[in-house]
């Protein structure tokens, strides 16, 4: 039963992310955003025992988004930007002890996505990253509540 609940919650979560960003933010391309949050969903909705503190998730993701947007402003070859983005993201997360693997994808979106998302600039940190994380967090709390009801955990 737990697997079915997680499956349905992940569908509902990503449907909310898609609809929220599509309708409330002028329908900017959401495919890249959903893909970036895919790794977060695996951590949140799988049955693994790995738990990440919400503050670490938010900080690492916001810092990763900032790094990606910042590096996108430089006139380097794309491959150099990608290498620097991932490496800088790892360094910052290690220094701050806030390691969260999905942030690696979040830092790449401003570099690899279409011009619409790149044009967001630093707004990318607020929308879609912070809003997407809040939606995933909300659904993770719902998952925890349902697990408590179903299994008395």
Image: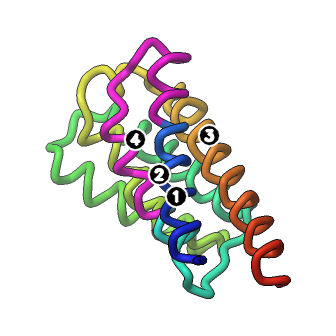
Across and down, in percent, residue 36 comes to 39, 51
- Quarter containing the N terminus: bottom right
Q: Quadrant of residue 49?
A: bottom right
User: Would you say 35 lies left or right of 147 here?
Assistant: left
Q: Secondary structure at mark 4?
A: helix
For disc 1, the marked residue is 8
Q: CA distance from mark 3 to mark 4?
A: 11 Å
| Residue 32 shown in magenta | yes
Nearest to the observer: residue 122 or residue 56:
56
Q: Secondary structure at mark 2?
A: helix
Please give the label number shown on residue 11. Answer: 2
First in sequence: mark 2 or mark 4?
Answer: 2
The structure residue drawn at horizontal position 20% and vertical position 41%, both measured from the top left corner, is 76
Q: CA distance from mark 4 to mark 1?
A: 20 Å
User: Would you say 31 lies left or right of 42 here?
Assistant: left
Note whether residue 76 is visible. Answer: yes
Q: Look at the image and give the residue range highlighted in magenta.
A: 18-40
């Amino acid at each position: 039963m737990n697997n079915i609940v997680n499956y349905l919650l992940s569908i509902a979560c990503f449907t909310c992310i898609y609809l929220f960003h599509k309708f409330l933010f002028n329908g900017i391309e959401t495919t890249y955003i959903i893909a970036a949050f895919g790794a977060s969903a695996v951590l949140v909705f799988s049955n693994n025992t790995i738990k990440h503190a919400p503050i670490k998730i938010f900080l690492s993701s916001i810092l990763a988004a900032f790094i990606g947007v910042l590096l996108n402003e430089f006139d380097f070859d794309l491959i150099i930007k990608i290498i620097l983005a991932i490496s800088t993201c790892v360094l910052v997360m290690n220094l701050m002890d806030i390691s969260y693997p999905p942030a690696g994808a979040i830092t790449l979106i401003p570099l690899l996505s279409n011009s619409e998302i790149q044009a967001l600039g630093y707004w990318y940190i607020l929308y879609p990253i912070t809003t997407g994380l809040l939606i995933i967090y909300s659904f993770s709390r719902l998952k925890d509540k349902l697990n408590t009801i179903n299994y008395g955990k």
